[in-house]
Structure formats: structure tokens, C-alpha cells
Amino acid sequence: MISMPEAIDMVLSRAPVLPVESVPFRDAIGRVLASDVFSPRPHPPFPASIMDGYAVRSVDCPGTLRVVGASRAGAPHDTHGSVESGTAVYITTGAPVPCWADAVVPVERIVTLKENTNVQIKVDASYKPGTNVRAVGSDIALHETLLFSGDVIGPHELGIAALAGIRNAETHASPRLAVLSTGDELVDPFSFGDVSGDDDENEPKRVASGSIYDANRHMLLAMAVEAGCVTTDLGIVKDDPLALACAIQNAVLTGADIIVASGGVSEGDKDYLKQVLLGEFSFDGQPDTVKGAIHFGRVLMKPGKPLTFGEIKTNTKTVLLFGLPGNPVSAAVTFALCVKPAVRRMSGYLNPHPPRIHAVLGHDIVLDHERPEYHRAVLHWPEGTVRDVQDKVDMTLGNCPYQVNLGTENLPTAISTGRQISSRLTSMKGAEVLLELPKGPGFCGKDTRVSALLIRGELGVSREMHMGRVRPVVTPAAAPTANHGVLGAAVAKTAGVTRNDSSCDSGKTRRRHGEKPKVITVVMHEMVPALNVDELLEESMIPDGERRVTDDGNDDGFAVLSAAIRVVAESNETSNSNIEGTWQVSQVFAESGTSASLATTIRHAACTSQIVLVAPSGPAGVSSQAAVVVGTDLGFPGLADRMRHGIEGVVSGDDKELNLKELADKHAGAGVGAGQVAGCVVLSVPPRNAYHAIKSGVQRMLVVPREKWEGLVL
């Protein structure tokens, strides 16, 4: 059994991008461009009036001008040669400006004078050349890139192409997807007549005892159309391996790129899909009529564990085959998570994954004990604004105020769609996201920050929002003896802090550099117990992006937290009374200890902090050190050296006198790195002697204004 991220990666590695074809732009809605689109001519192609008025020579204004004609959209003014000075032409919005005119006077800014049959206008103000005139190419320049390869064609893209006069689009072909349902119990709800033989053209079939309507096939066909596929309905296939092999073979012969079968993938005696795919059945005396390969047959997820993925190779191409579970919710979820990304990859999407956002839970959700869950939910946004979630719990340790900060973000609230059993299709009604929840035991409490995969109402088209995956805080099912707060009992015990529930703060986050609070945020990754040899071996088999940690544990993180609290407490005691406010320490968890995850968390923490300390991760702190490089935009010359100076006794000396860990520390720069992002100073802390490193690098900054920090180390 593999994880869902591994399953998606495997599917995408097997999904080829389809060939390029030229189609009329008006027929290409939903397709992905395979090449850039350039403007063959400028727009506007002539100087055009911005408003109704009179086209004039700017040098003639102010003055009294004689009206000699009119220029209207589609009927430009014909000058019949040169036009003498002191003349004007009535002009409408969008009409060509005569070649001799260089400005347009609004109609409401003139006074009309008549003398016999001659019409004159009086202009009281002066006008500069170009006033109220759209120049040639001011909207679209000649040969300008209008659309880019990878853009998805929508109504606005079609309008741009039409404006430029571009008729055809080079796009990737739309995948051809065939859908079938398996099961003797299934009845098509949209076919007419009674199963007993009494026909009624106005009523759907009444199901006999033991039968049910086939919901999956129609739902999956609609999802495929919505994803941009050309679909084929293969109907209902009875629980007969030869009939199933025949249906699959017909789909292959008729040009399907993807085959989606619903049902027949579990362990029942009538579940034949895997055997058929492996070529164990034939028909019409032809052996191995269908023969392919299975890449996985079970996935560690809820709902959808029986999800199966394989391939059927022909002389000309490879056809992807997905066996989705028969339960309708499982079928819908696995289509959204695996089939749709494959469709998007084949269609040419630059990022085929479903968009991921962050949300906070509107209520507690109990976790499944055995499998990670993709929980159906709707998003609620407060009227008039997005929600500003600020989960902070005040702590005290010695003389230092200490805040636990789980993140301050503008996030929606996720509300479950109700009972989540896989047969209850109504749990998909209105569902906008799939919440990515870890396996239990325990539960995720209200206001816990989670990641959510958008399955409806995607944000954007070709380049959607993709945020990092969140590993939510899990509350144990049995409450610990200590008061369980944001950090949890184990954290409170390690850090020696106490929770004060009455002092939670929820105010607007100050974003601008000059208004940032005096906060040091420690970036950590999830705490786990120390691993034994067997656990380490099991952890090594997990893909890097899914591991809980990448080093020996997270004890170093709490050492950094305690050291930061100690340094801040000392600085607050000795702080210059002219420096307003005292420093506080905050803490956030990254999804994992990888450099990419830590870098993402660094950028989030930098929005609400003046200093970010990254707890060590990886051998000798190399992952956390790399995260500073990835997660910052500027360096901070001299600061890393100053931190190393505080631990010279640890990293100096002859190599022969150092043990293996000390030697790694030394040659990895002690795991120390420094940089800046969003006006925030970011430092990776060494795996050992955190207090001395932080004190040497940071303490002097805490007692002087921010604008003087660079002068302390340069």
C-alpha cells in the first residue's frame, strides 16, 4: 500500500502530454496553449478618439474653429487633401482621428456658434498634442506577446485573440476518456421502462429487489467533461470478466487515452478488474485480448483505499486505466485526486495538481485511526472581509513574555459536510475542498490550521494558488494530565511553560516593516518521540516530503526555543528605557524538517516578526541552513560569522580531535546561515550550544533600533 502523494506522482510520471493540434480559437475554450500567441498588428491600428468631441490641431487652441466634417466609428473623415488651419472635425468615441489633427476637445468643453450654413465652435482652453487620443498600439503593440504557452483558454483569452484577429490556436489535444460501471446490481436511472416489462416512457426504471441506480458513471462522465475531456460512455458492464475485457478492449480500439472503471477493484469474488488488466481472460478465442500492467492496487487513504492504476500498451500509444472504488464518494474523491491531475498533465497544464490553500477548522474533527483522510468540507468567508485568524497563547518563563503563535493568516473557515462514510454521496454536495487530515488516534480541534485541496471553484485558471501542505496539530484522544494547550503536554513539559487561556489575543496583524511587533519567531517542525532502529528504518522508506522529521527528532528545536526565551529575558532586563516595548518569543511549526518546508514557513513567519530563528534540521543542520538560503531574498553580511564566534570552542580545533558529529558541524559551517526577507532577519541556529550562538548573534540587536542592526556586524 502506498501513500496518496506517491500514487499521484506515479500517475503523473506515466501520463504523457498529448500532441499539439491547431483548432479555431472559438472552439478551444478550456484547452491549454502549446505556443505563445503574438499580435500580428497593433491595436488600435489608427489614432482613436477616447471620447465624443472635436478633433483639432492643438496649436489652434484656444480659438474659434470652423467645423468641416465628421469622423465616426466605421466612417472616418475624408480630408480630400490638406485642411487649412482653424478647422475642426466632429468625432465620436473610437473613431479615427484625422491625420492633420493631434487632439480631441470634449464636446462639453466647447461653445457652438452658427453663421448661416457654417458651424463654428469656440474653444476657451489650450490642449497639448495627444490629449484624449489613443495612440497606435497603445493597447496592444505590434508583435506583442498576448498569450503564453501553458495559458488555459477562457472567455477573456478568446476575446484577446479576436481583438488581434487571430483565428486559430495551437493547443494540446483534449484527452479522450471512457467511463464504465461494473456490477450486476446496477440499473441506469436515465433509461426508460420498468424492469418487469411494463413500459412507461415518462418514468425511469423502478429498481428490482437487490438493485440500485448507477450514480457513479454519470457523475464521473460529468467530472471528466468539466476537466476538459472528450468522453465515451461505455455503459454498465455485468460482473463477467469476459464482458469487462471486451468493454476495455473496445475502449482501447476506439482511441481512448484514459479508461475509468467504477467498481470491481476490491477483494470480492466478483471483482475482476485487476485480473482482466493482467491478461488472465480472453474472448472470441483470442488469448491475452487485454493485457497490461498494474502499478498500484491499494492506497493508504480514506476514502478510496482500493484505488487501482495500470496501463495498457498498444502499438501506437499507452492507455491509462483507473479502477475506482464502487462507493460513490470514494469514486468522486479518487477521480479528483488522481484522474483529474492525469487529465491536466495530458492536456498540457503547467501544474496538474489540484490547488491547495490553508483553512482553519470550524469545529473538532475526529481522526481515522488507520488512514489519512480527505475530508469533504465547505469554506465560509466572513461577510465583507476574509477572516483574520490569530491564534496566540500568552506564556511566561522567568521575566520573558512568551507567545505561542500558530500563524496569523487571512484564512477561511472549513465546515464539514457531515457524516463522511464513503457510500453517502450527499457528503459531496456543496463540497469545495478536501481537507488533508493525518491519521489518528486523536482529533484536530476547532481553529486548527489545515491544508485543503480545492475541488470546486478553483482560484485562477492556468497558474492557480498552491500553498504548502500543513501538518495540523493533533490533540490526543485522552487528555494529558497537564492542561493541554496549543503546544501540547509534552511541549509544555519540555519548554517549562504554562498556559494562560484567559489572555489569548486576536487582533489585526501589522504587516508593514515599520509596524512589525517586537517578536522573535522560532521555526520548528513537529515533535516526535526519539526513534529506535526499527522506526528509523521505517521512516527512511517514506518519501522525503511526507516525513515527520529529517533528523533525530525535535529536541534541538525546544533547545532553541528555551535559548531564545533566555536571551530575550536577559535583554528585556537590560534594555534601554528609550526603546519602546519589550521583546517576545513566538513559535510556529513547519510541515516537515525539509529545507523547502522550512523555507515556506520562514516567509510566513517573516510577515509578523522582526527576527526568525530556524531550529536545526538535517545532519549538522544542513537542511535548516539551506532553508535560510531558499527562504530569504537578501544576505546579512557578518551575522553568521558573529554567531559562529559565540561557539568557537565547539567548532574550532584540529579535525583529529573532533568526533564525527563535531566534524560534520565544523565543515557544514556549524549549521549557521543568515539572510533577510520582508525586512525580517532570518538565522539558522546550530545543533549545539544554541544559547551562546543566539546570544552572540542576536542579543545586541534587541537593545538598539532596527535601522541600526546592520551597523552592528558590518
Image: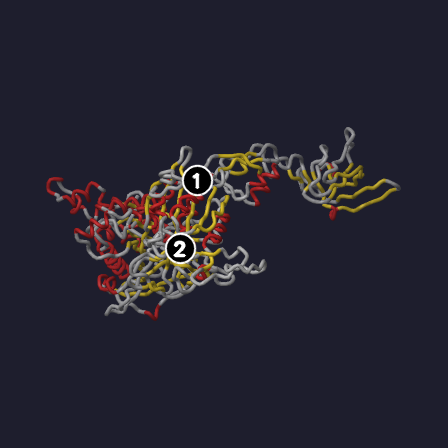
Residue 25 vertical position relative to residue 473 in the rendered view, above or below:
above
Residue 477 vertical position relative to residue 80 in the rendered view, above or below:
below
Instruction: Pick whichever, 624 or 710, lies toward us.
Output: 624
x, y percentage for residue 422? 39, 59
Residue identified by numbered label 1: 252
Residue identified by numbered label 2: 326
Left or right position of 317 against 56 = left
Instruction: Pick whichever, 281 or 617, lies toward us.
Output: 281
Residue 548 vertical position relative to residue 316 in the rendered view, above or below:
below
What is the three-letter code of the residue carrying label 2? Gly
Q: Quadrant of residue 410?
A: bottom left
Residue placed furthest toward the right: 116
Is there any visible trace of residue 46 in the rendered image? yes
Is there any visible trace of residue 678 in the rendered image? no
What is the three-letter code of the residue carrying label 1? Val
Instruction: Pick whichever, 584 or 91, lies toward us.
Output: 91
Left or right position of 705 against 63 = left
Left or right position of 418 against 48 = left
For label 1, the SS is helix
Considering the image in quadrants, where does the C terminus appear? top left
User: Few, some or many C-alpha atoms within 10 Å of disc 1 (few <14, some 14-19, many ≥20)?
Assistant: many
Residue placed furthest toward the top: 81
x, y percentage for residue 305? 34, 54
User: Few, some or many C-alpha atoms within 10 Å of disc 2 (few <14, some 14-19, many ≥20)?
Assistant: many
Residue 122 vertical position relative to residue 559 in the rendered view, above or below:
above
Numbered circle sitting on residue 657: none
Q: Looking at the image, which residue is at 57% across and 60% down?
A: 200
Q: Looking at the image, which residue is at 50% across and 45% down?
A: 231
